[in-house]
Amino acid sequence: MQAAQQQINLSDPEANPKTAERKRQFIDIYNTKITRDGAANLLMWLESDTDFFTAPASTRFHLSEEGGLCQHSLNVYRRLNASAKALPDCSEETLAIVSLLHDVCKTNFYTVEERNAKDASGKWVKVPYYAVEDKFPLGHGEKSLFLIHSFIALTHDEALAIRHHMGGFGASPGDYSIGNAFTMSRLALELHIADMRATHVDEKEQ
Ligand SMILES: [Fe+2]
Ligand SMILES: [Fe+2]
């Protein structure tokens, strides 16, 4: 594989205009739609104590780039809002909370490692890449649920959606809780579909 010249930054969103713009869009929607008690502290935590705005969405599967996690969250927000007609009982705040925050489990989760690769001239160089170092291995939806609920109170519907947004991926055989959650909560089903559409349609093109 030929090495691409790249920098990987997990600390300063303002160092890259694209990352800064993604952060601006996220905060604009967040502050407009989410007014629940604790929301300001949650946002302050994301900005000050996590790499949410610079982290990738994955190590190599989708939006494996600086700011990818923030962009993915925006993509899921837009996809879920496109399904809002199916969710007449859900407020705009609920749609924003579950979509923008469903993957906060991926904050402080990635590190930057180096591997050897050849550059365009055939010379061996060190190339940075994303790796996983889970500092709080609580699960995926489970961790997002715990972190969000540490700051803001969630409804049962929102909790089901965040916990089960991955659908059957990683589920144990014989675990019927996902199907039960999707039967009880249309929001949970629609968030899972929005997550899949963002990952497998939108992010193939970005
Ligand atoms: Fe996820
Ligand atoms: Fe996601």
Image: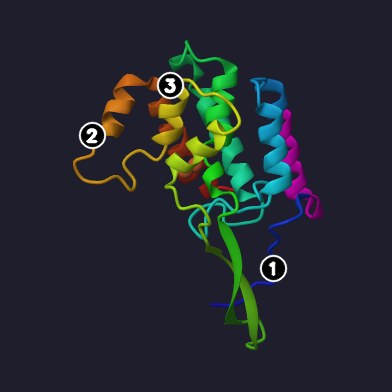
Viewer-nearest residue: 21 or 45: 45
Badge 2 residue CB within 8 Å of ligand 1 = no
* Disc sitting over residue 120 in the figure: none
> Based on the displayed image, in which of its 4 quarters is residue 95 positioned?
top right
Residue 151 showing in the rendered view: yes
43 in relation to 85, above or below:
below
Task: Give residue 176's mark.
Answer: 2
| Gap in angstroms between the C-alphas marked 2 and 3 | 17 Å
Which is in the foreground here, disc 3 or disc 1? 3
Relative side of 48 to 150, left or right: right
Rendered view: 4 above or below 133: below
Question: Decide: marks 2, 3 in contact (CB < 8 A)?
Answer: no
Asked whether disc 3 touches disc 1, contact meaning CB atoms under 8 Å apart, the reply is: no
Q: Which portion, as a residue range, is magenta?
A: 14-29
Res 174 quadrant in image: top left
Please name the residue shown 59% across and 63% down the image: 111
Tell me: residue 179, above or below residue 6.
above
**Mark 2 and mark 1: Cα distance apart in space:** 44 Å
- Residue tagged 3: 157
Taking the view exactly as shown, the residue that stands out farthest to the bottom is 123
- The amino acid type, in three-letter code, at marker 1 is Gln
Dot 3 amino acid type: Asp
- SS at circle 3: helix
Residue at position x 73%, y 29% in the image = 28
**Residue at 58% over, 39% down:** 73
In the image, is the residue at mark 1 within 8 Å of ligand 2 by its beta carbon? no
Under circle 2, the secondary element is loop
Q: Residue furthest top?
A: 89
Question: Is 27 included in the stretch rendered in magenta?
Answer: yes
Q: Residue 22: percent from the left, percent from the top?
A: 71, 42
The earlier-in-sequence mark between 2 and 1 is 1
Question: According to the image, label 1 marks what residue?
Answer: 6
